[in-house]
Amino acid sequence: MTKSTIVAVAGARFEDLDIEAHVLATTGAVLRRTPATSRDELVAGCSGAAVVLTAAHPRFTRDVLAGLPHLRAIVRYGIGVDNIDLAAASDHGIMVCNVPDFGTEEVALHAVALALALMRRIPQASADTRAGLWDLGRLRPMHSPAACIAGVVGLGRIGRTTARYLSGLGFRVWGFDPFLTASSLKDEGLVVCSSLDELFADADLVTLHLPATRETRGLIGRRSLLAMKQGVLIVNTSRGELIDEVALLEALVSGRVGGVGLDVLGAEPPAKDDPLLSHPRAMVTPHSAWCTVEAEARLRRMAAAEVARVLGGERPVNLVNA
């Protein structure tokens, strides 16, 4: 067995690697878990590997990639490749792949669940009841979906699925995506806005489904929050970097934002004293939107299948830095 057949697994917290081993059984690859708490540990653990399977952490910076001359590809367990320096990978001839469609329904469902919990004020109602309060006054006003506009920002797989779910619940659904035209979405059953300001001005609920890029980081900040309706609800199941959390907290405190449901944060895990965690109108879940038994199995199979293609000399299906 040569070093070129090593597949390093970094940052993944699965109990075992049985699914990956089954998919890669015919390739002769050896799976090797590697610690990833420091740059040196990461380089040492991935040394000699032909491919790395990685979770959202650790970070594959230019400096790390320079220390891995045998590396042919990095396959991300998931969608976002924020932790990989794509330009550096391309410079070193390293393919970067992701798995964009393993948990579309799960993430969309989580976004809708957060939205409904905010609309129905379920966290506050539950807390009040546990505290011995049996009173609807603190929960008002609540509105029905038919009376509300849901604004979906980002209309890729997950955004369109979320829009479909919301429409099925009775919401009037508006969408915006800078890369798609109204004609390309004519069969999606939603109103396509010409600008974000148009969507922000009228949406009662804003749900985010965008990657973190130079253009989208800080998309929800003081200016955009001021452009939104008083009492707007905001849901984010995509990337924490999309939101200026200081500005969001200010808007929560002032009441401009009526509630937030966040599955992602700028820093994960957050500090224990992060004020968003204790705010009564904020719900924060631990980047769990994707998580079902079925989605995890799909993710691992699909990621391992990309590794098998690389080792077999085939072009990966989801090559990010083509």
Image (cartoon, grey):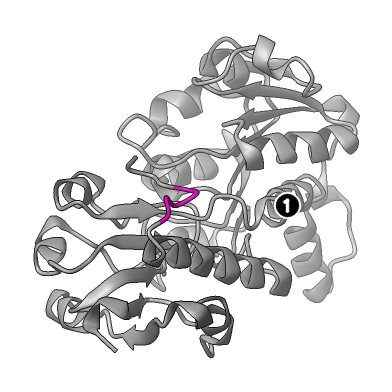
Q: Which residues are magenta?
A: 314-318
Whether residue 254 is situated above or below residue 79 in the rendered picture: above
Q: Nearer the viewer, residue 99 or 94?
A: 94
Residue 45 in view in this figure:
yes
Q: Residue 123 at what x, y percent from top left?
A: 73, 61
Q: Give the amino acid at mark 1.
A: Glu
Q: Residue 24 at what x, y percent from top left?
A: 50, 77
Whether residue 129 is situated above or below residue 143 in the rendered picture: below
Give the residue drawn at x 67%, y 66%: 295
- 164 to the left or right of 63: right
Whether residue 289 is situated above or below residue 301 in the rendered picture: above
Helix, strand or loop under label 1: helix
Give the residue drawn at x 44%, y 56%: 265
Q: Nearer the viewer, residue 300 or 282?
A: 300
Question: Which secondary structure type mostly characterizes the magenta part of the structure?
Answer: loop
- 130 to the left or right of 39: right
Q: Which residue is mark 1?
A: 105
- 10 to the left or right of 242: left
Q: Which quadrant of the view contains residue 269?
A: bottom left
